Amino acid sequence: MADYLVYSTLCTVVTYLTYKYILKETRLFTFNRFFLLAGTLVCLIAPLLEFSWGNIYNSAPKIEISQLISSEIEIENLDQNTISYINPETPLIIYLISISYIIISNIFIFRYFRNINSIIKSINSSTRIKKKDYYYLHTSNYQKYSYSFFRTIIIPFKYLKNKKLSDILIKHESTHARQLHTLDILLIEFIKCFFWFNPIIWFLKNEISENHEFIADKNVINQNINPTDYISQILRSMYNSGTGLTSGFSLVTTKNRLNMLTANNYSKRKKWIRLALGLIVTLFAFSFTSFNPDDINNDPFIVIIDAGHGGKDPGSPSEKDINLMISKEILNQSQNTNIKIILTRDSDEYISLSDRVTFINNQKADMFLSIHCNNSLDPEKNGPEGYFSDKNEYHNLSKKATEIVVSEQVNEFNKKGKIKTAGFKILKEINKPGVLLELGYMSNKEDSEFLLNSGNHKNIADNILKSLNKIEKQMR
């Protein structure tokens, strides 16, 4: 979430500055309208997406394991020692921020729909005096300003007494109605309900509204209206909409509008240069926020995933199947990422511990992770546990990796996790950092129900991949 907020904010900053200092002066008002809207939407959506570029790696080669079936399943001396606990991350400040965000967003949403309702009531209480092909003209004695809402135009009755003024107002507002500028305003105001904390969204909303006025002003002038007369009529109509959801004859940006009406046009060449520059800057911002640079010129981070047990060794009830399903889900989610997964088994087969160790040591991988489900005579025991061997050559890296893996699972289960050392053969005899992850206790009702629900496997696998990404950054 923090990454999303940073990237989306940076992208909106680039979009705003690109428009403000490059595109605005081109007076390509229609293009700018769609640039502002599309740019805002892209900035909010792009950071949620992730596209890989650079090298796409094929699956790492797998060495075949000899199928040696022992007459007995190997039993290990566990020799476990708990060295630390990991609690779910629920800081009070995060809770307070979340509650504050929900409350404020709901206030904005309430205000949004209240304003729409207020406009509809105002229109219903007005008098329709004319119907054209693309708009309805209404008037009201109680209205102090002219505005349009979709295809309805409201002109104060007092302005209708001045034919020159009313004609200009109708021409101006009919542009808003014909081009449905209300849709733009409703969209950006709705976005503000959820991104009210980003000041750039407020600035973009102002620019969108101002650009609507530029479009309407230009359309009026193009109808053989004298610019001087038009400016004088603008100065006679200094009223603003009270809701912010209508397109109005607004003078909040009067100075800018007058400048646009009187400024000299750029040459076509300068316009195209500015347009191209603006698009290049915006595309760069989009690529920065939505493309993953980790894949560029980097070797893949290769992880051996061991689905514990299998075949005639079932482990805890349903464990071998859960281990395999989650391991396959990790493999599936890792496609087109810099994390490359090698599975020790991809079917329900028995592989001895010695064969697993031999297989792991023959692979050119960066680390090893074994997936398991725990069991206990005490049904109250619950939560994830991670093991590493202090006899392993890479025990310091293994310990750090174990802490990261368990932390991600703790946040999923919302339970306390444990970090333990253990004399597991599969951890102490391998030639790379290794972690054995117990996802939860099958002997605990709540853990068991969670792990048996295949709908949760995707989240578990996603958390494991997140932890592997963090481990990669620690190791490289």
Image: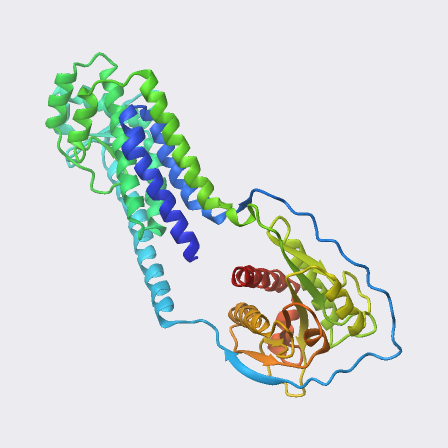
Number of callouts: 0
**Left of 442 or right of it: where is 41?**
left
**Image colouring:** rainbow
Residue 217 or residue 165, whichever sits in front: 217
Residue 297 or residue 130, whichever sits in front: 297
Query: Is residue 415 among the parts visible in the rendering?
Result: yes
Percent across and percent down for residue 350 are 82, 69
The residue at the far top in this view is 224
Q: Please say if 447 is above or below 241.
A: below
Query: Is residue 161 among the parts visible in the rendering?
Result: no
Percent across and percent down for residue 189 are 32, 44
**Left of 37 or right of it: where is 315?**
right
Query: Quadrant where the N terminus lies?
Result: bottom left
Q: Residue 428 appears in which quarter of the rendering?
A: bottom right
Q: Please say if 260 is above or below 436.
A: above
Q: Residue 169 appears in which quarter of the rendering?
A: top left
- Seen at 30% across and 45% down, the residue is 200
Residue 309 or residue 296, whichever sits in front: 296
- Seen at 28% across and 50% down, the residue is 111
The residue at the far front in this view is 393
**Left of 286 or right of it: where is 99?**
left
Q: Please say if 97 is above or below 254.
A: below
- Seen at 36% across and 26% down, the residue is 275
The residue at the far right in this view is 71
Query: Quadrant where the C terminus lies?
Result: bottom right
Q: Residue 204 appears in which quarter of the rendering?
A: top left
Percent across and percent down for residue 281 are 39, 35
Percent across and percent down for residue 283 are 43, 36
Q: Please say if 70 is above or below 263.
A: below
Residue 352 or residue 192, whichever sits in front: 352
